[in-house]
Amino acid sequence: QVQLVESGGGLVPPGGSLRLSCAASGFTFSSYAFNWYRQAPGKERELVAGISSGGRGITNYADSVKGRFTISRTNAKNTVYLQMNSLKPEDTAVYYCNAEHWLTQYAYWGQGTQVTVSS
């Protein structure tokens, strides 16, 4: 069956780094664009970063994370990553992995992983 499993979240002090992983299975990985969303308590879910399907690796980022976060994908391992550097308390949220088919835009979601930035 289809699975998106996020990992790598945790508690980190301001200025620290984390790398989130999203392991995908049950569908054709290369046919899907991937996105990382986040949702903080009391706030709407927002798009953080995205990467295109296939091998072109076209990326986009929310203004709030540009220069600090990097999204990447390894098609051979069916895994997407989000490298987060210079973390700030306002980055605290549950981070969700999303896979969207390049043509149909059908989407799958992971269960989320908690990121907490606090001293």
Image (cartoon, helix red, strand yellow):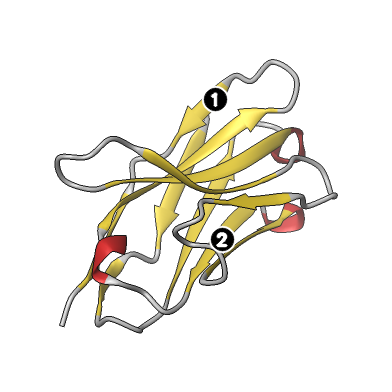
Q: Mark 2 and mark 1: span between their CA atoms?
A: 18 Å
The amino acid pointed to by label 1 is: Ala
Instruction: Reply above or below: 61 against 111.
Output: below
Give the image location of residue 114, x and y in percent: 26, 57
Marks 2 and 1, the one that precedes in the sequence? 2
Q: Is residue 10 above or below residue 96?
A: below
Residue that appears at 51% across and 55% down: 63
Q: Is residue 4 visible?
A: yes
Quarter the C terminus occupies: bottom left
Residue 107 tag number: 1
Q: Which residue in the rendered view is the most extreme toward the front?
A: 63
Task: Left or right? Give the position of 24 relative to 32.
Answer: left
Residue 1 appears in the rendering:
no
Identify the disc placed on residue 81: 2
- Residue visible at 64% across and 50% down? 60
Q: Position of residue 22 (x, y in %)?
A: 51, 52
Is 94 situated above or below 42? below
Identify which residue is drawn at 28% across, 81% down: 14
Q: Residue at x 69, y 15 (%)?
A: 104
Q: Is residue 96 left or right of residue 26?
A: left
Between residues 110 and 91, which one lies in front from this camera angle? Answer: 91
Give the x, y percent position of residue 37.
43, 44
Q: Secondary structure at mark 1?
A: strand
Give left or right: position of 111 versus 20: left
In the displayed image of the protein, which residue is found farthest to the top?
104
Judged from the image, the secondary structure of the residue bearing numbered disc 2 is strand
Is disc 2 in contact with disc 1, using a CB cutoff of under 8 Å? no
- Does residue 91 appear to the left or right of 77 in the view shown? left
User: Which amino acid lies under the numbered mark 2 shown in the image of this protein?
Assistant: Tyr
